[in-house]
Image: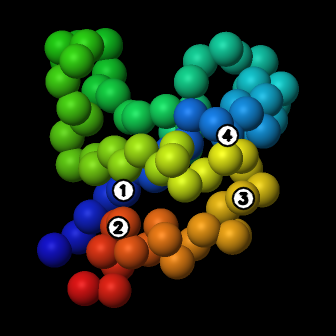
Amino acid sequence: AVRLVNGYSEHDWMLRLVYRSKAWSVANVAGAVSVRPGPRAARDAPAPLVENVDLSDLVNGHLSYPHVMEQIFARLRLED
């Protein structure tokens, strides 16, 4: 089966800052928050076909991703 995974960390301030500086937007960016459906769907409904995985307990900031990739892969069960 095919999975579309949005792994995000609420601690990734660098991603938020770079996105906002380039997009001139204060909107949230995938990778820093969970993905939600568009405005036509119920606000609390999960986005269809997107699996949101909160990695905040593993990722302390944008530069910590390379150091925790094994734990991330294990959590996502990418080796199965």
Q: Give the labeled residue for mark 3.
A: 64
Protein image colouring? rainbow
Image quadrant in which the N terminus is located:
bottom left
Q: Which element carries disc 1, helix, strand or loop?
A: strand
Q: Nearer the viewer, mark 4 or mark 1?
A: 4
Marks 2 and 3, the one that precedes in the sequence: 3
Identify residue for label 4. 12
At label 4, which amino acid type do we have?
A: Asp
Residue 24 in the image: above or below residue 37: above
**Residue type at mark 3?**
Ser
Disc on the earlier residue, 2 or 4: 4
Task: Name the residue nearer the viewer: 64 or 5.
Answer: 64
Type of amino acid under label 2: Leu
Question: In terms of depth relative to the viewer, which is nearer, 23 or 30?
Answer: 30
| First-in-chain label (4 vs 1) | 1
Mark 1, residue position: 5
* Residue labelled with disc 2: 76
Where, quadrant-wise, is the C terminus in this rendering? bottom left
Q: Give residue 78's position: percent from left, percent from top.
A: 35, 78
- Report, in whole angstroms, how far the alpha carbon at label 2 lies from the one at label 3: 17 Å
Q: Residue at x 52, y 44 (%)?
A: 56
